[in-house]
Amino acid sequence: MAEDFVIEMLHITKEFPGIKANDDITLQLRKGEVHALLGENGAGKSTLMSVLFGLYQPEAGQIRKNGKEVAIRNPNDANALGIGMVHQHFKLVECFSVLDNIILGVEPNKMGFLQKAEARKKVMALSEKYGLRVDPDALVSDISVGMQQRVEILKMLYRDNEILIFDEPTAVLTPQEIDELMEIMRGFKKEGKSILFITHKLNEIMAVADRCTVLRKGKYMGTVDIKDTTKEELSRMMVGRDVQLQVEKQPANPGAVVLDVQNVTMHNDQRKKDSVKDVTFQVHAGEIVCLAGIEGNGQTEFVYGLTGLEKLTNGKITLDGKDITHATIRQRSKDGMSHIPEDRHKHGLVLDYSLENNMVLQRYWQPEFQKGGFIRSDKVREYSDRLIAQYDVRSGQGSSTIVRSMSGGNQQKAIIAREIDRDPKLLIAVQPTRGLDVGAIEYIHKQIVAERDKGTAVLLVSLELDEVMNLSDRILVMYEGEIVGEFDPKTTTVQELGLYMAGARKQGKETK
């Protein structure tokens, strides 16, 4: 039945220093199916797909297309075979426009002259057909992450690919965008395209996939038909134990005000309007307040203002009774603010540093880590080893691993370990579980709740409605830069939150 499979990856083995990322894995993709690839962070999912896309060469194994063995030496070979990939961390040129990114490498030309109008027509037709609305002239650096993903999908469609690989496609999307993406995938399937879908979100697999292959620690665990399985069964295959999908926590016991935000306004010069409008709220010690909203409604800008990455136009921020409105980022950090940023590559890590150096980024100047102006590398190593063990950060070479080579989930765990271990007064957690598997999410949620129970004030910014409902003690909804409602997760519903997030409703000023 070989002809049944459009792609076969047979007995693939891929090694990196100190780690066998793929250990004798076989994956078979049928024509016109959505095939999910499930596994924990660092299980080898992205590596396997990077082998199929020609980014890595395997040590052993072969790849077949329609029953014939093929050699994929680089992404151009993959594109020539009709294989396209949307990467977890997008591969876009930030200073180029959307259109230029889509056509990069396959620019239409006549006699050496670029035919941009033709390319634009094709891009707009694709965007219309699949409901992927984009502004072709916008710079990639100015658009939201959800938009960037659309650009990546259009890039793949522009090249007329038939086999589409999505690597953690929903990690950065809002609930509405996820539903849209699921619809788009179903549309692709109808057209006879074959999809490989890497994820660790079980709901999505159940919603859209036909079959699912599970990897664990680089080994093949089996392939199951979705109609014959359950979420619990899949999470057991993936983690090797039963996982709690609900957060267990006691009712909050809020103490004194830790964070006091008064009338904060921030102006966006590019868009010529206020991205944050007159925001006022408080977070007390020992509670988790969640700022929920659809991406692009001012949460990112607000967090930038709060953490000192951008200046406020107006308003005042007080941390534990101290005015920090104009304080530097280091000062805010010294005053007890920890920040798990939204974009781990841009603001969370120095990718070409080792893991141990990343672990002490905010503390290297403290007496325990330096002497006479020289860093004590033995102390740094000791500290880093402790955090790695405590937070189960997996990497090929432990503390000396270069962070760029780690999986996205383990990069995230490293940031969380660093920020929580500083014993903050205020923990700002922006999308803390983005791109993480159920086992890691369970662990991080427990850590955040433990922080709350210690008396830390936690400000959670999340798009994952399940997370918002599960973790929060209070929910503030942000729409177009304003707080439009405050809710108690015990008495509200996801549907109600969704309406406020979409701007269909707004609480009156008189209601709390």
Image (tube, rainbow, N blue to C red):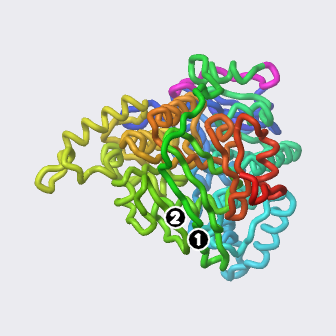
Residue picked out by circle 1: 266
Q: Which residue type does callout 2 highlight? A: Gly
Q: Is residue 221 magenta?
A: yes
> At x 54% / y 39%, what residue is drawn?
254
Range shown magenta:
215-228
Q: Is residue 390 magenta?
A: no
Left or right: residue 121 versus residue 212 is right
Relative to 6, does residue 1 appear above or below in the rendering?
above
Q: Which mark is residue 305?
A: 2
Examine the residues drawn in magenta and state their main secondary structure. strand
Q: Which residue type does callout 1 highlight? A: Met
Query: Is disc 1 in contact with disc 2, using a CB cutoff of under 8 Å?
Result: yes
Left or right: residue 225 versus residue 57 is right
**Furthest-front residue in this view:** 510
- x, y percent for residue 373: 15, 56
> At x 64% / y 43%, what residue is drawn?
474
Nearest the eye: 496 or 115 = 496
Left or right: residue 96 versus residue 123 is left
**Furthest-left residue in this view:** 372
Q: Quadrant of residue 394?
A: top left
Relative to 385, does residue 243 appear above or below in the rendering?
above
